[in-house]
Amino acid sequence: MKQRIHAFSTFCLHFFTYVLHVREALFGLVALVCLGALGFSSLEGRTLSESIYFAFITALSIGYGDIAPKTPGGRILSISIGLVGMVFIGLSVAVATKALGDTVKQFHEENTDT
């Protein structure tokens, strides 16, 4: 059990270290999704809370379908939000993969040294 907790804490340490390296990109992508929500609100005549909800549901590729764009501008903006979300998810997965690889490598080196 202690080894699992140590492995998880090691993964978290690596993960947050790499997040710090790409934090500007991550925050920039989240800012673009928020700007997309503002644009969606004005194009579609939705409240800001509905637009933020729609933007993040679209960016994270969940897409419940309870809010859908009606105007051509809203549809184009929705595609743009989805593309930004794909980059965000890809970057997040890349960071997690790198952190997991470093964790496995560290544990392999620790176990082969003894």
Image: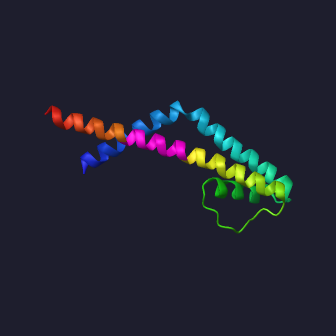
The quadrant where residue 68 appears: bottom right
30 vs 111, left or right, is right
Residue at figure coordinates x 65%, y 46% from the top left: 84
Residue at figure coordinates x 69%, y 41% from the top left: 31
Residue 29 x %, y %: 65, 41
Residue 40 x %, y %: 79, 54
Residue at figure coordinates x 59%, y 39% from the top left: 26
Vertical relation: 53 (above or below) 87 = below
Foreground: 63 or 5?
63
The outermost residue toward the left is: 114
Q: Which residues are drawn in magenta? A: 90-100
Quarter occupied by the C terminus: top left
Whether residue 91 appears in magenta in the rendering, the answer is yes
- Give the main secondary structure, helix, strand or loop, of the magenta stretch: helix
The outermost residue toward the bottom is: 66
103 vs 57, left or right, is left
Residue at figure coordinates x 83%, y 58% from the top left: 72
Residue 5 x %, y %: 31, 47
The quadrant where residue 22 appears: top right
Vertical relation: 3 (above or below) 50 = above
**How are the residues colored?**
rainbow
Whether residue 89 appears in magenta in the rendering, the answer is no
Residue 101 x %, y %: 35, 40
